[in-house]
Amino acid sequence: MLVSWPNLPIIIEGNLDIVFKSDRFKCEFVPVDNIVDALKHKDRICEIHLECKTSRASLRLTRIAEAALEPFPMLTRLELSLRDGMDVVLPDSFMGGSVPRLQSLDLFHVSFPTLPNLLLSATDLNYLRLWDIPNSGYISPEGFVSCLSTMTRLETFHLGFRIPRPPPDQRSRHPLQLIRIILPALTRFLFRGNSEYLDDLMAQIDVPLLEELNVTIFNQLVFDMPQLLRLLSRTERLSALNQADILIDGDYVRVKFSPQRGTASHKSLVLFIKCRDVDWQISSLAQVFRPSLPPLSTLERLDIFESLQSLPRWQDGMENIQWLELLQPFTAVKNLYLSKELVSRVAPALQELIGDGVAELLLPALQNLFIGGPQPTGLVQEAIAKFILERQLSGHSVAVHHW
């Protein structure tokens, strides 16, 4: 049919799991042959969207990929998606290493180790999403930087790995080359992986217009990200946010820095740390805050609350010092909001500040403490009262409100 039609642009789109049945001819038909035939018209194909969720369908995708080994000069969008557990490795010569008009690339759970070679030709790219990258698709930070240098129009970049760490033979960190590139149009960056990889990547790029940074870090013992701090300090739109929300979940802890509520702005810095026990969540977050993230110096509001959908795993033996270490970097916070559950856990920590004039050293700018739920009673009420009294005696009064 394509031969008899006019030379119209072609969009290839389909779910490779779908099998068409013909009662008339008593057979099943999978449209792989049609797709392979359509790929021969590479000068007309402008978009490709393929999805597969079964091992049989992944074999079909492999066949299709092996039929696309020549350049696609008109392709503007490419989307390939596999379900978790599937294993498809795109060939080194996929699309002939040339997609000069590509504007959007979305690969989900697809291995493509030589992807940087293809991306070098995609100078018009404005959307790049490489998510759930399996072990076999690992690409070094240096490999990404080499191709990102040509993407002056890239606005959105998602980079997420499936496993916590890169393959063992690539895990050692080598001294980085002092080569830094600028992504002048990038406004949104999402990352999921380990902190070492992120820091190595951030050491080599500048993103002056970045407005949204969303980072998910796998659980690890040490969080050392000096290059991320450098990038934030040099990114004006993310260095002056004035409120933060800390969410304690059953599987992670999340902190979101954002502008003041009610403002029409999409600027935000979101950090997820994937771990389960609350004591480890709090300690990990305090460790990240310890070098003083740039937004911490301008924050005026801090909300701390727990997830109602995935209840946190509270530890009875959690030490009060962990809460104090978490709150210590928030030196500019004027308004502190605590949910009902958090009040009963943070209040005993505040009580440890009584005496010797140390109460004003924690949250020195605090003016209002907002408590969720009903009026606290017993030891919790007593701990809050002692903290408030100590602040009054030091000349730094704090008002208590309910919300």
Image (spheres, grey):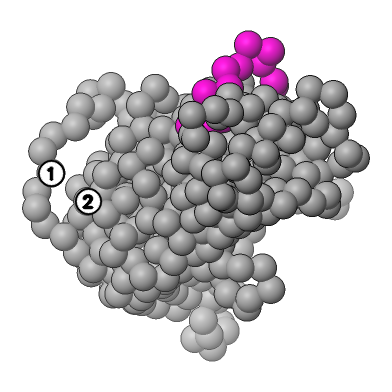
Relative horizontal placement of residue 358, taking residue 100 as reference (left or right): right
Q: Answer whether labels 2 and 1 touch (C-beta < 8 Å).
A: yes
Q: Residue 119: horizontal and vertical position, in percent?
A: 29, 61
Q: Quadrant of the N terminus?
A: bottom right
* Residue 135 higher or lower than 63, as above or below: above
Q: Residue 244: horizontal and vertical position, in percent?
A: 58, 54
- The reply to whether the magenta stretch includes residue 320 is yes
Query: Where does label 2 land, which residue?
Result: 203
Q: Please give the name of the residue rendered at 72% of the width and 52% of the height, measured from the top-left corner.
A: 399
Q: Label 2, label 1: how many angstroms apart (C-alpha)?
A: 8 Å
What is the three-letter code of the residue carrying label 1? Leu
Q: Secondary structure at mark 2?
A: loop
What is the three-letter code of the residue carrying label 2? Ala
Query: Where does label 1 land, which residue?
Result: 176
Tell me which segment is drawn in magenta.
Answer: 313-326
Along the line of sight, the residue nearer the viewer: 44 or 129: 129
Along the line of sight, the residue nearer the viewer: 214 or 236: 236
Q: Is residue 130 visible?
A: no
Q: Please give the name of the residue rendered at 31% of the width and 35% of the height, measured from the top-left corner.
A: 224
